Amino acid sequence: MSLLTSVDARTSHVDDFRVLLDDALHDFLRARQDLAPELTAELRDLILAGGKRIRPTFAWWGWRAAGGSAHTSELTDAVVRAMVALEMLQCCALVHDDVMDRSATRRGKPAVHESFAALHRHQRWSGSARQYGDSAAILVGDLALAWADDALVTAGLPSDALGRAWGPWQAMRTEMIMGQHLDILAVARREESLEHAVRVAALKTAAYTVERPLHLGAALAGADENVVDCLRAYGHDIGVAFQLRDDLIGVFGDSSVTGKPVGEDLREGKRTPLMSIALSRAQDRPAAQRLLRRCLESGAVSDRTVDEVRALLVELGAVAAVEKHIDSLAVSGLAALDRAVIDDEARHELVRLANRAVARTT
């Protein structure tokens, strides 16, 4: 399904904002490069190495949708600087997630904890290289979280705008952490229900990737309750669709494109909606159940097992079911957007962003 059938072929301005944001990120990090230099270097490398800048982009268009004008230079600059906070928050999540998931790579390079562990081994320092790597990475994530708050409160926003934004900002931080806890709890409890998996997706990804960034941007612009409600409804549905697409990429994605090993989510035993659907559909097939649970619980999954599970997910119709749900969420999300009285250019860009979120391959 193409989500762009309702918009014309005008040039997107999403990439224009990306240029402004990257400049603000460089300035923010440059001003802090002498603080905790070893930690800052890893933080800087991770942030500037790439990333889709999804969260600040949704926040920007939430601001624009609610009447924020890109033609008011001083305020625009302050809003862009405030969006740096979202990229810092994302960096915190990535670093901590990689430690918890024991992920070896991030964006095609060694994960932060692996980089510090390698340094420990190279320098022949005392103690455990792995423990040092994990500990240093946790501190990098903590630093990113602290600087996220700094970026927001020092951006130069008017006090009333900052006050309005603080509520969604607080909610976003809490929801991100709660979602991550539910994720690791699902592994510990061997949780297999689809309801739990979707709740994790809603909190861990939808809330802090799309819904709350939109809420934050709209709050900065002083949006009324109806606009906020419509944007949040759109953000929830597109955000869950984004996570479902991420689940498919985590199983079927091309490692040369994603920068992650083939089938990494399978190797990590993630309890995703995709796996919940597959387990439900394999109830009368003991061999299929055993294969799926081996993948979820063994802790060491071979390339052959990955290939077998990927084929089984298709055979059981789990992949098709997830694709269907993604399409349904995209439709309902765009319907919520249609109900909002917002700027036409912002509406156009939010439709484009929905398309990018649900149809991406990385």
Image: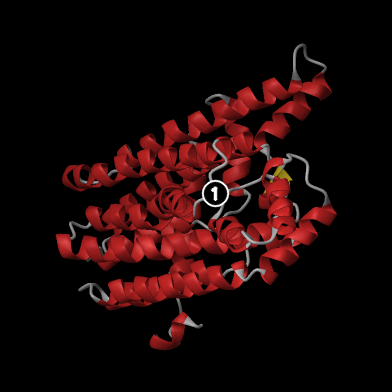
Position of the C terminus by quadrant: bottom right
Q: In the rendered image, is residue 224 in sight?
A: no
Outermost residue to the top: 126
- Where residue 182 sits: x, y (%)? 47, 40
Q: Secondary structure at mark 1?
A: loop
The residue lying toward the viewer, choosing from 127 and 21, is: 127
- 203 lies left or right of 286: left
- 287 lies left or right of 83: right
- Where residue 157 sits: x, y (%)? 26, 46
> Where 46 falls versus 50 (above or below)?
above
| Circle 1: residue type | Glu
- Where residue 176 sits: x, y (%)? 42, 42
- Where residue 62 sits: x, y (%)? 31, 62
- 210 lies left or right of 224: right
Q: Residue at x 48, y 70 (%)?
A: 325
The residue lying toward the viewer, choosing from 118 and 290, is: 290
Report the coloring of the rendering. secondary structure
Q: Quadrant of residue 128?
A: top right
The residue lying toward the viewer, choosing from 343 and 264, is: 264
Q: Pointer 1: what residue?
A: 192
Q: In the rendered image, is residue 340 in sight?
A: yes
Q: Residue at x 57, y 28 (%)?
A: 138
- 248 lies left or right of 115: left
How packed mark 1 is, by other alpha carbons closer than 10 Å (few <14, some 14-19, many 20 or more), is: some
Outermost residue to the front: 284
Image label count: 1
Q: Residue at x 67, y 32 (%)?
A: 113
> Where 316 falls versus 200 (above or below)?
below
